[in-house]
Amino acid sequence: MSFRTIIRFLSLGFFIFLLWMTTFPLKGWFPVDFFLRLDPLIFLGTVISSRQLITALIPGLLILLLTLVLGRFFCGYICPMGITLDVTDKVFGPGKNNNTKLSAQKHAVMRNIKYLVLLFILGTCLLGISSVFLASPLSLVTRFYGLVLYPGLVFMGEGFLTLVMPLSSALGVSFLTYAELEPYRFATQWFILLFFAAVFALAYYSPRFWCRYLCPSGALMALFSRNPVVGRKVSEACTDCSICQKKCPMDAIDSDPTRTSHHECIACETCVRVCPEQAVNFGIGEKKSGRVTGYLPARRQVLASLAAGAGSALLIQTGISSVKSEFIPGNILPSSLIRPPGALPEESFLGRCIRCGQCMKVCPTNTLQPVWLDGGLGGIFSPKVLPRRGPCDPLCNACGMVCPSGALRSLPLAEKMWAKIGTSYIIPFKCLAWEWKRECLVCYEVCPYAALELKRVDGNPVPVPYVIHHKCSGCGACEYHCPVQAGSAIVVEPMESLRMSKGSYIDKGRAIGLDLEADPDRQRRPPGHLFDGDDPGDLPPGFSS
Ligand code: SF4
Ligand code: SF4
């Protein structure tokens, strides 16, 4: 096994291990978003769109600077997307004797696309809309592994446990008999799967099609690796057999095999291995004579791509569901768009969120789901709370801890409990107590914030629930547990949510009259006590007795 194979094996293994560790409760011994922090495009795009230096993402800058010395080593050795493609290329690739099915002319044109994708993304970032998530390899591959492969594996594991249960029960293997796996489900996974199926299938035309032609992070690193300190060198022993040129998975070797497109080379050393004369090596030294000048987009291509990106961002910002500011009248934000606790104000949030899915993967109740088009094009794949799927656990602050870009603030548990994400309200015509006059205490019983009270109202033989809005955090326990089928009779909307870039949620919450003391284990008062002294005529706005 070659050194490179070992490094790649370890890199992919570590990536999968960290993703597996992105599970509640977090161990906290290592940043589970380590790989996301290494992507130079995530660094550059997020810094531009948020107009802030995000220190957690500085490793991406270091990778970019290292590229000056080592060339595109990140693509060849570390990037989990590239390693995944190396594996799937074996299935879909053009075959051993063919490094591409594209003509030299098509290849020359197509390899410029990645620069245009890069410029498009930077164009959107200039206007404060982060579209890094569209093509950043680390964002894409984390989403794929976390939101598609992981739930698929859990689902299969669950099926396996059900299958072996009769056997394990008969054999008395109790740990297998009673083992359970929590099934996770995510929205948009079909889109993510189809996208990756297409990327894998493109290998039919050439290996690492994505890296060669489309990857904007690769393009960014290519701009820094036009003449790396360590690079491919060819000695006098070369006989011009061109085997290396035919086998290079990135088509980085010129028809004169002594000449190298260093900006395309990912230092995979295939050329070293296949050269029958052992004329190729990687090292420091004079190789300028063998260098092929790297592609640089023409000025009008740069301008057109940047303008296309900025124009798209402008269209998003002038769309009907764009965010102008948080609380001004006329903002049309979907009532279902409940952001996780600690989410920055919406504009900053969209500028920072790289849609990696880490927060959704770690969420123990599976309430965090990727948004499809309901948040407009600018919000696609960003996380939202879906209370009917699961409540936001007051004792969990994991989403903010794993967010690499700071789109969700990392909050201590006490602060997180005050990070109000919405307020629930009752739909009386669906409520068992209000409409059907049947005794139901479910929302009252499950609310960890004691934000529901039961009262008697005229003409109703059973007590009915009320929401005490300043005690409601929007956690959604009530919506999740409401026994009414299909849509719940109590729903959370993002009204009164606290979205702050800095400062204490506790201080702010107290200042505006909130009272968010969660006690998930508190003992409920006996219902009889609740009706003492309540004014039966005291109905909330919109209710009639
Ligand atoms: S909010 Fe979630 S999806 Fe967005 S960057 Fe943070 S962890 Fe990733
Ligand atoms: S009423 Fe209680 S359970 Fe429902 S969202 Fe508000 S705090 Fe959560």
Image (spheres, helix red, strand yellow):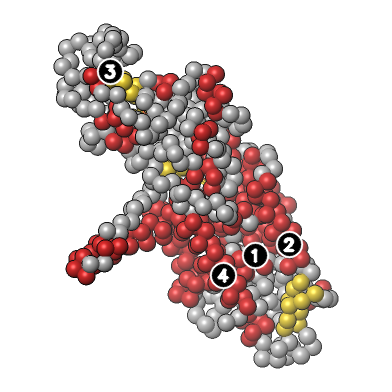
Alpha carbon separation for disc pair 4 and 1: 14 Å
Alpha carbon separation for disc pair 2 and 3: 66 Å
Alpha carbon separation for disc pair 3 and 1: 63 Å
Residue type, numbered disc 1: Phe
Q: Give the foreground label among 3 and 1.
A: 3
Q: Residue at x 34, y 21 (%)?
A: 467
Q: Residue at x 22, y 70 (%)?
A: 171
Residue type, numbered disc 3: Leu
Can residue 93 be seen here? Answer: yes
Q: Quadrant of residue 508?
A: top right
Q: Is residue 457 left or right of residue 251?
A: left
Other-residue count near label 1 (Cα within 10 Å), few / some / many at <14 / 14–19 / ≥20? many
Q: Residue tagged by mark 3?
A: 530
Q: Is residue 77 left or right of residue 16?
A: right
Q: Residue tagged by mark 1?
A: 74
Can residue 322 be seen here? Answer: no
Alpha carbon separation for disc pair 2 and 4: 20 Å
Above or below, 303 against 205 in this view is above
Pinpoint residue 75: horizontal percent, then vertical percent.
62, 66
Q: Residue at x 42, y 43 (%)?
A: 368
Residue type, numbered disc 2: Leu
Q: Tell me the element at label 3.
A: helix
Q: Decide if ligand 1 comes within 8 Å of the CB at mark 4.
A: no
Q: Give the foreground label among 4 and 1.
A: 4
**Which of pointers 4 and 1 lies earlier in the amino acid sequence?**
4
Q: Quadrant of residue 115?
A: bottom right
Alpha carbon separation for disc pair 2 and 1: 9 Å
Q: Give the foreground label among 4 and 3.
A: 3
Q: Residue tagged by mark 2?
A: 66
Q: Residue at x 79, y 88 (%)?
A: 236
Answer whether labels 2 and 1 touch (C-beta < 8 Å): yes
**Which of pointers 4 and 3 lies earlier in the amino acid sequence?**
4
